[in-house]
Image (spheres, coloured by chain):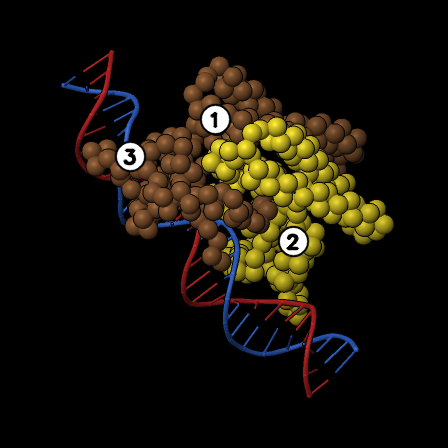
Chain colours: A yellow, B brown, C red, D blue
Amino acid sequence: MARVAQTEVAVLAALGVQPMTGYAVREAIRDQLGHFWSESFGQIYPTLTALAERGLIEHPDPASPAWALTQPGRERMLDLLRTEIPATPPRDPLMLRLFFGAALGPEECAALVRDARERARSQLAAFGAIRQVMDAESEYAEHHPYWFITLSAGEHRARAAIAWADETLAILDGMPAD
Amino acid sequence: MARVAQTEVAVLAALGVQPMTGYAVREAIRDQLGHFWSESFGQIYPTLTALAERGLIEHPDPASPAWALTQPGRERMLDLLRTEIPATPPRDPLMLRLFFGAALGPEECAALVRDARERARSQLAAFGAIRQVMDAESEYAEHHPYWFITLSAGEHRARAAIAWADETLAILDGMPAD
DNA sequence: TCATTCATGTAAGTGGTTACATGATTCA
DNA sequence: TGAATCATGTAACCACTTACATGAATGA
């Protein structure tokens, strides 16, 4: 318990890049971080209010709706980024299904695996596209190395998923149908 | 909305292997499926009650507390295993942190990556151990091929995580400290 | 002027965890 | 006899999603 709300981490970190409205935070998370993270409005706005009450963020310019980190907010953000990686219990719906694959039989399992492979392939393609866009732009240059690191993680995972799917489909293909 | 509770899938599938008490369901999920799935008592017992009310499971032997699938229950299980893979929004706390890694700097990011590599290594070792145990036993032989498939997925992922971590640490090592 | 985007918020519900409580059974 | 395990359950809470509502600003 006392598990730290991950929305707090995401919102503080986003505001750490530059001051933003809640709307812009959500856009940034969806567009830039969408493959690895997600937030909904219903979570962002209450979090912003709570952070403001705790003095971690503020409206530096009263004429603008944008939020910015206060100094305590920046320290809190750094603490969260550094250490608190929550150990979320694993819940992989594909693995759940394949583990009980005997009930389905090899052919239906193969269909699940092919779907997963297709998802991994389109992810890989999406990552390639992002890589090109990022190579062509120079804004936020200091962030680029880190963005490439996450991109690379996504690519490694997707390639691993594809390789596993290929092997698995070969195995399932060799199994007698029910 | 109308997202199917995944606990229902896990419980039905477990009872599909053999009749069990709620306690045994949890033990089986934790011990056999712990790397890919988790359930808590607080979720299992209400789910069992609800499934019984819907006629999907029953106590076939009134003298035993074990639950078993009814025929409609078996059909429901097959439907769920076949198709309903929920698209859970991604929430990867490590990627969240690395994406905003510029705030932390290369050294602290490297610490996060080394931790992740360590977790992947011990997972890989755990999978190897499970593989050996499974090779040595012959119970539930019909399930073995499917268990190997999930095991193999875990190994592919862990190896990908390790390779990515090695590459990433080399990159971070070459970056100037703040 | 009218659609779109920007912007903020709330209410209801969901799926799940944690902690606690109880009691039976097993076995050293 | 007393600890450990088996077994069931519930109450409180949590993070989050979905759907809905509102209104200002922008621009074709």
Discs 3, 1 touching: Cβ within 8 Å: no
Q: Nearer the viewer, mark 3 or mark 2?
A: 3
Residue annotated with mark 3: B66
Mark 3 element type = loop
Q: Which numbered dot is residue A29?
A: 2
Q: Given the image, on which type of amino acid does mark 1 rest?
A: Glu
Residue annotated with mark 1: B142
**Callout 2: few (<14), some (14-19), or many (20+) C-alpha neighbours within 10 Å?**
many
Q: Position of residue B101 (x, y in %)?
A: 69, 41
- A143 above or below B119? below
Discs 1, 2 touching: Cβ within 8 Å: no
Q: Given the image, on which type of amino acid does mark 3 rest?
A: Ala
Farthest residue to the right: give it.
A136
Label 3 marks a residue whose chain is B
Residue at 79% in and 34% down? B176
Q: Position of residue A1 (x, y in %)?
A: 42, 41
Q: Do badges 3 and 2 share one subunit?
A: no
Mark 2 element type = helix
